Amino acid sequence: MMEPGLIQAGDIPFPLYRSEEHACPYLEGLKAAELVVLAPRMSPESYQGLMDRGFRRSGSYFYRPNCGACQRCVPIRLAVAGFSPSKSQRRVERRNADLRVEVGPPVLDDERLKVYELYQRQQHKTATSLTREHYRQFFCESPINTVEMSYWLGSALLGVGILDVCPDALSSVYFYFHPAYARRSLGVYSGLREIAECRRRGLGYWYLGYYVAGCRKMEYKTRFRPFELLEGGRVWRAAGLAQGTQAGPRGC
């Protein structure tokens, strides 16, 4: 990776690198690159500052798309105080009222690894077996404060969400679920429970990562309204209208 300089996160300057170009994971036929911060540890305050400049965490590094003319990866967040679930989201809540949700530190065990591998094979067509070391590095070893929300039907694990905890936000890192329970809409349900967890902790925002115009698998993010988009990597602007409207995100 090339080193273009430093970036300030709170009171600390971190080395900033640029990755090599690679295939875009969101839009077929396009190339992508990232600005990357490597940090063995980072304070929650510094990370929230980086998120407010467009960065996200993946494993042990922090990144922001840096793809030249393409600017379609736009950070998205929800101000939880203004959120009210839609009719379809309330139906998902009722459908999953029999689930138990547990919150704690990330855990690595055979059950989680099995569900994660099933999810990768079904959702992302990953054919190779995934190792315990991959899972540990990606989910359990975090440079900041990270928690797990696990979803249970009796003794059966249905899904796992990984979230980073910041001073005024929860940031959704990853969610996976058992494909046999896809009809429960567990991705939507996990979002509703993560919003509820923000409220329980007295946090103002839920960060969802990037909204990518033209990428179908990212469209669900705009169904949690009213959402905000980060304009120019600097300023959060209200973009999602109230529940029940038909308009999409402004400027996308």
Image: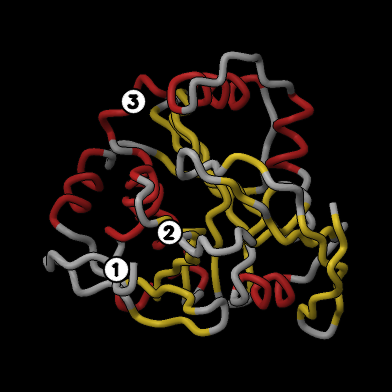
Q: Identify the residue at image location x=13%, y=55%.
A: 87
Secondary structure of the residue carrying tag 1 is: loop
Up-down relation of residue 45 to residue 16 (above or below): below
In the picture of the structure, the residue carrying the numbered disc 3 is 181
Whole-percent x, y for residue 116 in the image: 56, 26
Helix, strand or loop at label 2? It is strand
The amino acid type, in three-letter code, at marker 1 is Pro
Q: Position of residue 219 (x, y in %)?
A: 32, 51
- Taking the image as shown, residue 241 lies to the left or right of residue 141, namely left
Q: Which residue is mark 2?
A: 211
Label 3 Cα crowd, 10 Å radius (few <14 / some 14-19 / many 20+): few
Q: CA distance from mark 1 to mark 2?
A: 9 Å
In primary-sequence order, the first of circles 1 and 2 is 2
Residue 126 position within the rendered picture, expressed as x and y whole percent measured from the top left:
56, 20
Q: Mark 3 or mark 2: which is in front?
A: 2
**Split into 4 quadrants, where in the image is the C terminus?**
bottom left
Q: Position of residue 18 (x, y in %)?
A: 77, 58
